[in-house]
Image (cartoon, coloured by chain):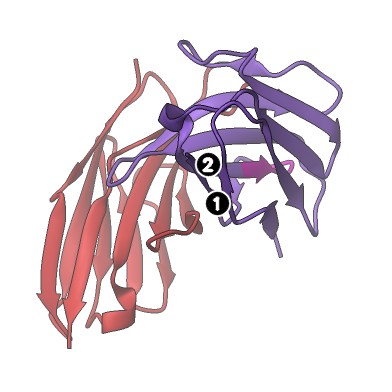
Chain colours: A red, B purple
Amino acid sequence: EDQVTQSPEALRLQEGESSSLNCSYTVSGLRGLFWYRQDPGKGPEFLFTLYSAGEEKEKERLKATLTKKESFLHITAPKPEDSATYLCAVLNSGGSNYKLTFGKGTLLTVNP
Amino acid sequence: GAVVSQHPSRVICKSGTSVKIECRSLDFQATTMFWYRQFPKQSLMLMATSNEGSKATYEQGVEKDKFLINHASLTLSTLTVTSAHPEDSSFYICSARPLGNEQFFGPGTRLTVL
């Protein structure tokens, strides 16, 4: 069974204080690992897809990296508007149903 | 691109009534659509997967007679919560998958059953 564990559950940062969120995963075959951002009361917003170990993707202050066991979402010099819950999900390469397995998320709060 | 809408965004209904939620992919054709529910401070729980013109595939423990899913076209899926009860109150979110691996989510529908 696929498993995704995100840590920490919650993270408080001061504006400008860089940090990383972790996503550890267990999957029989990885088709893709996805990062989403979710604001309160809204649906998840797609951020990145990573497919193979060593791959990196960047968008503004966010950079996602991938190894064979985990992914990191690095946040450089965060701003208060980066406050949100960040969700990690994996897609197994087996089967054809494209079901995602989500972690429980990391609630990020950036204080001004 | 890859915009998904949901309607309504919020609905309050009396116990025993049925509620229909629409999910539309606005700028792409969705090979597959998914329906999730999310409880406060919890992650998304997949309810069912649907492909256009086919019967939905429900996850274990999800009552298919209670949560009716219709995927009539490549841009529209509907979820009908039949005979809703207070325990069905939740945040329902749909997602749509174009040809690739990514899923794009709608803004969600908050259902409150009195």
Q: Which residues are magenta?
A: B95-100
Q: CA distance from mark 2 to mark 1?
A: 6 Å
Q: Which corner quadrant of the image does residue A29 belong to?
A: top left
Q: In this image, B76 relative to B34: left or right?
A: right
The amino acid type of the residue labelled 2 equals Tyr
Q: Is residue A16 left or right of residue A58?
A: left
Whether labels 2 and 1 share one chain = yes
Reading the chain from its start, which is encountered first: label 2 or label 1?
2
Q: Which mark is residue B108?
A: 1
* Rendering coords of residue B13 (x, y %): 58, 42
Q: Amino acid at mark 1?
A: Gly
Q: Position of residue B11 (x, y in %)?
A: 59, 50
Sort mark 2 into few (<14), some (14-19) or many (20+) by Cα contacts within 10 Å.
many
Q: Is residue B15 above or below residue A12?
A: above
Q: Please identify the quarter of the rendering in which residue B3 is found.
A: bottom right
The foreground one among B65 and A20 is B65
Q: Which residue is mark 2?
A: B92
A71 in the magenta segment: no
Residue A31 seen in this snapshot: no
Callout 1: chain:
B
Residue in the picture at 48% in, 59% down: A42
Q: Which secondary structure lies at badge 1?
A: loop
Counting from the top left corner in percent of width and height, residue A11 is at: 13, 62
Q: Considering the image in quadrants, where does the N terminus of chain B appear?
A: bottom right
Under tag 2, what secondary structure? strand
Residue A112 versus residue A46 in the image, above or below: below
Residue A9 showing in the rendered view: yes
